[in-house]
Amino acid sequence: MDEREWLTGRFEEHRPRLRAVAYRMLGSVSEADDAVQDAWLRADRADTSGVENLGGWLTTVVARVCLDRLRSREQRREEPLEVDVHVPDPIVSHENGVDPEHEALLADAVGLALLVVLETLRPAERLAFVLHDMFAVPFEEIAPMIERTPATARQLASRARRRVHGQAPAPDPDLARQREVVDAFFAASRAGDFDALLAVLDPDVVLRSDGGAARPSLTRVLHGARTVTEQALLARQLSPFVRPALINGVAGVVVTPQGRPQVVMAFTVTGGKIVAIDVLADPERLRPLDLSVLDA
């Protein structure tokens, strides 16, 4: 086996972890795959004969590629929108279990609520948090990537951690209980039962919706149980088209009028109450979704 064949084989062994790093960094499955491919091209051109920890080295390469993409994304942003919400790409799985292909992407409970909060971080904060808190990369290795000291990298991760813990509460581990609460939400919506909806919502529930460029009227952030309840009652006509699914490993639904995905909703259920609802309603990003996994 020549050196290139050896490197190719080792890279494929590490690909699931590299995709997981890139997905957490970029919040996009397609961009994550592009970043991993870019990392392979860089690795293929490099002299890796002196690399002792190839997995760590490849993780660094992917992280740098993602950091460059995040910085470029930040520079391309136009004037801030009145409501700036970006719901990352959802991973849709059958409610009976996560597809094996998605297991690495979704390890560590990477729900949409968490990814939405990661989208609000500066690139260096996101990198420091993702690599250290999710992949146990030491700050001494993170610091050179962001051209900071290890102490500063630690501070960036700490700042990001506080925001994540404050805005993305951990979901209840019992998926069956999550599903009961989500089913109760839609049953109350179909019945137009205001009080029943209030009963399943946390008083401080947050609904974040991303309609994209095609549906800007659906891009919004709503706070509070009464406001979210009123919105749910307005959207009750969608209830007959709800299909249960796991969305990034938590209970959610895909709304499919005429068999096509129109809305994806992920529910964060904590303490038996819905504390967050993250909605992707952008037709451009929903169109490529493969719903065949829901028929398994």
Image (cartoon, rainbow, N blue to C red):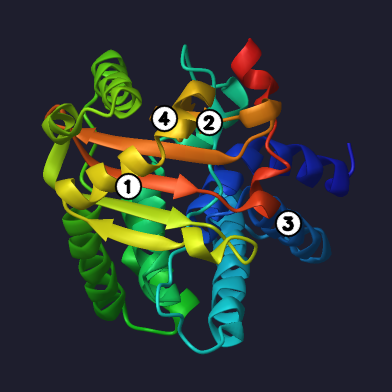
Q: Are marks 4 and 2 in contact (CB under 8 Å)?
A: yes
Going from N to C along the chain, the mark reached first, 2 or 3, is 3
Residue appearing at x 27%, y 80% in the figure: 152
Say which amino acid is labelled 3: Asp
Going from N to C along the chain, the mark reached first, 4 or 3, is 3
Say which amino acid is labelled 4: Gly
Q: Nearer the viewer, residue 53 or 226?
A: 226
Query: Mark 3 — residue?
Result: 34
Q: Quadrant of residue 37?
A: bottom right
Q: CA distance from mark 4 to mark 1?
A: 17 Å
Q: CA distance from mark 4 to mark 2?
A: 7 Å
| SS at mark 3 in the image | helix
Residue appearing at x 39%, y 41% in the figure: 111
| SS at mark 4 in the image | strand
Residue 42 is left or right of residue 100, and the answer is right
Say which amino acid is labelled 2: Val
Query: Mark 1 — residue?
Result: 231
Q: Quadrant of residue 50?
A: bottom right
Question: In the image, which is nearer the foreground, mark 1 or mark 3?
Answer: 1
- Spot occupied by residue 272 in the image (x, y as percentages of width and height): 14, 27
Task: Establish if 21 lies above or below 147.
Answer: above
| SS at mark 1 in the image | helix
Residue 226 is left or right of residue 292, and the answer is left
Q: CA distance from mark 2 to mark 3?
A: 26 Å
Residue 154 is left or right of residue 73, and the answer is left
Query: Mark 4 — residue?
Result: 252
Q: Nearer the viewer, residue 45 or 2?
A: 45
Q: Are marks 1 and 3 in contact (CB under 8 Å)?
A: no
Q: Badge 2: how crowded within 10 Å, few (<14), some, or many (20+)?
A: many
Query: Mark 2 — residue?
Result: 254
